[in-house]
Image (cartoon, rainbow, N blue to C red):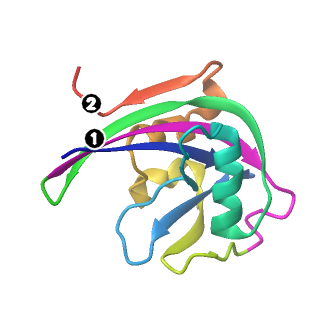
Amino acid sequence: MAKFHYLARAVIFSGERVLIARQVGANNTFLPGGHIGYGEPARKALIRRIKEETGFEVSTGRFLGAVEATWYKDEELNSEINLIFEASCPDINHHVVVESEEGHLEFIWVERMEVKLYNLLPEPIQSLVENLADEPGAFWGSMIDE
C-alpha cells in the first residue's frame, strides 16, 4: 500500500543562514514544518507545526513553491508534496539555539549555499534555498520521473 504526505515547510533565514531540521542521528535534513491536516489550510498548518516543533510563533510570508517526491521505505511507496513558504519570527535568528520541543528532532543553522552538505531533502529544495533571491516567481521541483 502506498502512503501520501501533504506537507507545509518553512524557509526561515537569518542573514545568509537558513534553519533546517533533522531526525536525531539521521544523515539527511529537511525544512521545518510538517503534515497538513485534512481540510486544514497550509499556512495554518505551518504555523501550528513550527509552534509544536520549536515553541515559537511564526508568521508566514510569500508562497515560494512546491516540491514533489517519491521514495520507498520498507518496500512501501511514499509520495509527498511540500508547499514551501517564507516564514519569520523575531525570536528566531542564528544567534539563538533553536531547541526542539520534540525529542526526536534537532535544529541547526547552516549557510544558505551549503545546504547540499547537509543532504537537505527532497533534493529540489536545495536549489530553491540556494537560488531564492534569483527566483521571481513560484518554484516547482520534482523528483518524480515524467
As helix, strand or loop, the secondary structure at mark 2 comes to: loop
What amino acid is labelled 1 in the image? Thr
- Identify the residue shown where x is 36% and y is 71%: 26
| Residue 140 horizontal/vertical position (percent) | 47, 24
Q: Which quarter of the rendering shows the C terminus?
A: top left
Q: Height in image: 121 above or below 68? A: below
> Would you say 62 lies left or right of 129 here?
right
Q: Which of 73/121 is in front?
A: 73
Mark 1: few/some/many CA within 10 Å (<14, 14-19, 20+)? some
Mark 2 sits on what residue?
144
Mark 2: few/some/many CA within 10 Å (<14, 14-19, 20+)? few
| Residue 118 horizontal/vertical position (percent) | 43, 60
Lower sequence index among marks 2 and 1 = 1
| Residue 38 horizontal/vertical position (percent) | 53, 42
Let me know if residue 89 appears in the view.
yes
Q: Height in image: 26 above or below 34? A: below
Q: Residue 140 colored magenta?
A: no
| Residue 45 horizontal/vertical position (percent) | 64, 47
Q: Residue 77 colored magenta?
A: yes
Q: Quadrant of residue 32?
A: bottom right
Mark 1 sits on what residue?
70
- Identify the residue shown where x is 70% and y is 44%: 44
Q: Residue furthest right?
A: 90
Q: Residue furthest left?
A: 75
What amino acid is labelled 2 in the image? Ile
Let me know if residue 16 appears in the view.
no
Q: Quadrant of residue 101?
A: bottom right
Residue interval drawn in magenta: 76-96
Q: Are marks 2 and 1 in contact (CB under 8 Å)?
A: yes
- Identify the residue shown where x is 12% and y is 54%: 75
